[in-house]
Image (cartoon, rainbow, N blue to C red):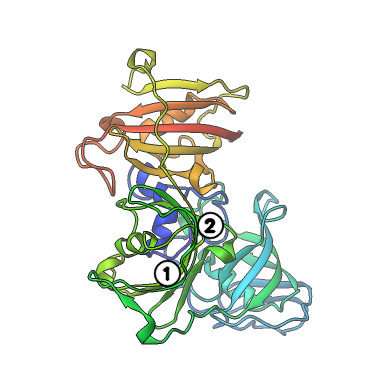
Amino acid sequence: MNLKRKNWWIGLLLLVSLILAACGPATHSGDAQPNLPGVESEGEEAAAGAAGDTAPSGSSGGGSTVTASGLEYVELEAGTGPMPQPGDMVSVHYTGTLEDGTEFDSSIGREPFSFTLGQGQVIPGWDEGIALMNEGGKARLIIPSELGYGPSGSGPIPPDATLIFEVELLEVRATPKPTDIAEEDYTITESGLKYYIFEQGSGATPQMGDLVTVDFELWLEDGTFLDSTIDRGTPYTFLLGSASSLPGLDEGMVLLQEGGRAQLTLPPQLADGSGATYVFEVTLLETEAPPTPTAVDDADFTVTDSGLKYFTISEGTGTMPQAGDTVSLNYTLWLEDGTLLDSSAQRGRPLEVTLGSGGTIPGFEEGVMLTPEGGKAQFIVPPELGYGETGGGIIPPNANLIFEIEVVEITSGQ
């Protein structure tokens, strides 16, 4: 799910875009559902206005109407609950197809998809279309390319594609607000972190370098709601003290024990450099030591013609991936000194990549193509197959990268 939000918390969830991109952002986000309606299209920034800004040009009852923006809205079943307003949290089930009937994604059989309406978290056609529904209703949204993924497309969605979504609006609820705490009850640290502990917790206390799993709700200082792992139903795991974390969040976590809950106000110098102050309400669910790479003798690696070093951890029984295939896989990434950088396995959300699309660094793609479905492997990507002399993001210059992957599923591109 490559959400439109360009702030740090989505950057963390999409760290793989920094890790694997061959040149610029990767085609896929590293989330388990890369084709959800949150994928950003070229030029949609200007189009992503608040939901409900454009009313249907036809009647508000059943049948089909076309809005001024070009969205076609077909009411399939009238809802009896409230109509969502910008800023409301909405939960939906959906199935997305192309005009030829090809299904590219569906939430059916998974948890419902939740997002904040009118915040640009989804493609413009969704923000507009969901705002026309009532809770409990079902509708078909026929979304032209300019309200969807635009001329670039995304993964299985081709450029300039018209998208057809059948959606059911399951729930509408007001955006959560931060807990109101008296100013004198806060503690402010020397760094400027402002915090209040609701509950200390009784489990282990995390240390820098540990993996922590948290649930959080997040706002700007003015109360603007940004995100919630609780609404997504997916706790977030990250590495304390890593280049991809936030200093204020790191500092706040080591004040808690497992089971603890706190409100943390991160001033700009402890946040993401955007100048914003963030307010978290966070629960520390678990802390653990980070995983380490499987020990492999250098003589046991196979070295390919390109210079990739490859070792099979366990044999797979499925097919070998080919160019054009979409591969769902779990991965963990370290630097050569054992520093953990990222892990989809820890997040519990496999990465999906389309081989041959140029969306990942060459060494990663080569390693994946050597691993059959069900197989596990370790491979070492030299700088010339990764980020070279300059590095990129949290990757230092001239870095050898250690990947361990498990190929979960291969979908043929034929």
Say which residue label 2 marks: 235
Name the one closer to the observer, 62 or 220: 220
User: Considering depth in this image, is 253 or 176 the residue closer to the camera?
Assistant: 253
Q: Which mark is residue 184?
A: none
Question: Three-letter amino acid code at disc 1?
Answer: Glu
Q: Is residue 21 at all visible to an observer of this figure?
A: no
Tag in front: 2 or 1: 2
Residue at figure coordinates x 59%, y 81% from the top left: 174
Whether 366 is drawn above or below 395: the answer is above
Q: Residue furthest front?
A: 202
State the image coordinates of residue 188 (x, y, percent, origin top left). 29, 75
Image position of 21 with respect to 275: above or below: above
In this view of the protein, which residue sits in the foreground, 41 or 161?
Answer: 41
Label 2 vs 1, first from the N-terminus: 1
* 238, above or below 68, in the image: above
Q: Is residue 193 visible?
A: yes
